[in-house]
Image (cartoon, helix red, strand yellow):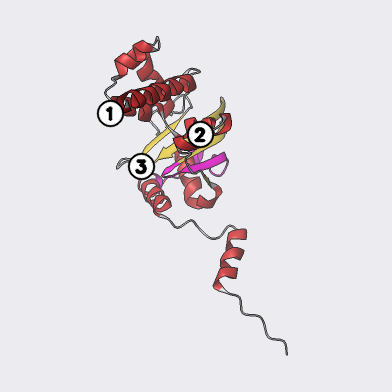
Amino acid sequence: MAHKRKRSRFTICIEQLERGQLSMKNDEVIALREAIEARWGDANGYKMRRYVDKFWDRTRRGRTITALVQGNHGDYTVSIDARESTLMSACSCYKGKGGYCHHCAALGQTFLAKPDSFIAIVPTPLEDVHDLESLKAYLNSVTLVDLVKQLRVNGIIQKAFAESIGMSSRHLSTVKSSELHNRYYHELGATKLACLWVLEKFSKNRKE
């Protein structure tokens, strides 16, 4: 009589991974799940349900998830951010600025059901930027809000920076806010590059 070979715990885990049944168990995912459940755990509307699991380009950066979904007026970028004490969400649809549209709720429900379907993206450190590809990855991993904060820490206020690149402080605020709501101005990348250049030059001058 043949005896079945006892499978190791490692083998079982690998099999579960292959079947997509082993959930990510880390602090970031747990924080996301708790925040999403608190906001949308009981969401069950028809408009929301028809978008659940319809997302593609699903990514997770720390406690932030982002994905695309096809809506009534094109493709929408939807995001949920649980980095702060208050959950933030946004959608590029016409009523998703405040994050209370059914696309945001559907993204939350999709994550609760299939957290492993979101590809974890490791941020690219600035010191690892050596070519255009890594530069693009870095710019995508940092917000203009974060860069302007770094300028302020180094003694450069937003108004002075904006004027130095020929932009009004009001428009710079609009570009910053729009990025957080998944609406991207064409000059966003160039403005981020300008921030990096000023930060680099300012740091060098301070060291000298």
The Cα atoms of the two marked residues, 3 and 1, are separated by 21 Å
Residue at the farthest top position: 166
The residue at which mark 2 appears reads as 129
Q: Nearer the viewer, residue 67 or 200?
A: 200
182 on left or right of 58: left
The residue at which mark 3 appears reads as 83
Residue 84's spot in the image, x, y percent?
Answer: 32, 41
Asked whether residue 102 is in view, the answer is no
Q: Residue sitting at 57 percent across and 29 percent down?
A: 132
Query: Type of residue at label 2?
Result: Val
Residue 20's spot in the image, x, y percent?
Answer: 58, 57
Q: Are marks 3 and 1 in contact (CB under 8 Å)?
A: no
- Disc number lying in front (2 or 1): 2
- Disc number lying in front (3 or 1): 1
Q: Secondary structure at mark 2?
A: loop
Q: Residue sitting at 59 percent across and 64 percent down?
A: 14
On screen, 176 above or below 38? above
